[in-house]
Image (cartoon, rainbow, N blue to C red):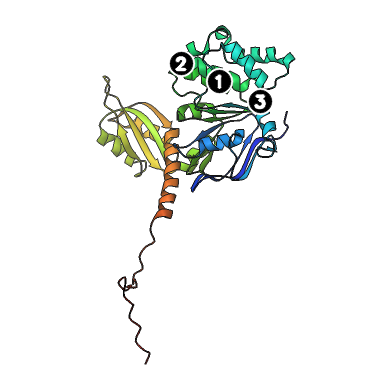
Amino acid sequence: MTTQKHTIEVERLHKRFGKIDAVDGISFKVEKGQIVGFLGPNGAGKSTTMRILTGYNRATSGVAKICGVSVAADPHFIKRRIGYMPENNPLPLDLRVREYLKYRAKVKEIPFTKRRRAIEQALESCDLLRAQDRIIGKLSKGFRQRVGIADAILANPEVIIMDEPTIGLDPHQVILIRDLIASLRGRMTVIISSHILPEIEMTCDQIIIINHGKIVGQGSPAQLRDTFIDHTTYQVEIAGTTKELEAALATIAPELQVERISDRDEDGFATAEIQIKGKRDYGERLFKTLAEHPHLRTRSLRSKKAPLEDVFLAATRRSWEEVDEKLAPPLASSSPKTSAPQGTKAAAPPPSQ
């Protein structure tokens, strides 16, 4: 097992398909035992990066290392240390769960004396013991995803890469898969690509956002909020008129604004979102002012974190704006030169005096 701090190291990785830069010089590192979310719009370069890390695709340039070894230099070594679960997991539908894992254990070159134990551990970790003798084709989508994860962790690899592991699952199945992935923390380094952003936030230690083949955001959910969200939001349950609420806010800071307010419930309370630019803490002053206001009744007040969707949109929007600036035509000169009509010669300048 590796003793390195970083199990995954990517430096200036580049992958070109024809004239398209699918991955454009990205660099990142992942510590041993971390769970990392890999986010981006469709076509951003996520799957291409993951396939390079697994050795399925070769990079055009740059370096990708797993456990300190270059993927390009020794792909066989790398494949022994990676468990990969693609988005559309190609499971053999006619095999039983245990039969399939026996076959995969042989393919993964797990020593014969250790195969039975490895299969038992994978079945137990993925809660598949009761389904081990069932035919894969007759399993639900959630159970098939668990079979795919059991395959990925079967050889106890140091790195697990999963592409959309919770796609198409119902809420109960999503929770089971989330808990299963969380149980790998500290044991294995896990990279997850997903469009279900709340799941990424609840599961991952670090998030990498990619767009146009470039990394546009990286860090913990809290660090990403600090980078991309430029306001503070409070949510208050209050009874009283919007006019009275706005007047009370103005006595604290003129910049405090009511962004939205819900319909009132049967007790006369509405939920209002109050926002102010910047990272400022007005919680105590808000609570004191609203509680003492003669025409307002306050039932609750809390600060509200921006959802990961807002962070994702802000990060990708910023990268789209940068691309738009690069593609924008240059501004015309204030005194453009007039060219001669096609097929004629431009008049010669008059001789100097």
Give the CA separation, mark 1 to mark 3.
14 Å
Q: Nearer the viewer, mark 2 or mark 1?
A: 1
Three-letter amino acid code of the residue under disc 1 = Gly
Tell me what residue is drawn at x 39 percent, y 32 percent. 287
Tag 2 secondary structure:
helix
Q: Which residue is mark 3?
A: 157
Q: Compare residues 34 and 247 and report the one nearer the observer.
A: 34
Q: Compare residues 323 and 47 and report the one nearer the observer.
A: 47
Q: Quadrant of the C terminus?
A: bottom left
Q: Residue 299: which quarter of the image?
A: top left
Tag 1 secondary structure:
helix
Q: Which residue is mark 2?
A: 172
Residue 148, numbered circle? 1
Dot 1 alpha-carbon crowd within 10 angstroms: few under 14, some 14 to 19, many 20 or more:
many
N-terminal-most mark, 1 or 3: 1
Give the CA separation, mark 2 to mark 1.
18 Å
Asked whether, in this view, residue 156 is left or right of residue 345, the answer is: right
Where residue 345 appears, as percent x and y from the top left, is 33, 77
Three-letter amino acid code of the residue under disc 3 = Pro
Q: Compare residues 37 and 258 and report the one nearer the observer.
A: 37
Where residue 118 appears, as percent x and y from the top left, is 67, 16
Q: Residue 337: which quarter of the image?
A: bottom left
Dot 2 alpha-carbon crowd within 10 angstroms: few under 14, some 14 to 19, many 20 or more:
few
Q: Compare residues 231 and 19 and report the one nearer the observer.
A: 19
N-terminal-most mark, 2 or 1: 1
Is residue 343 visible in the rendered image? The answer is yes
Where residue 3 appears, as percent x and y from the top left, is 73, 32
Give the CA separation, mark 3 to mark 2.
27 Å
Tell me what residue is drawn at x 32 percent, y 37 percent. 259
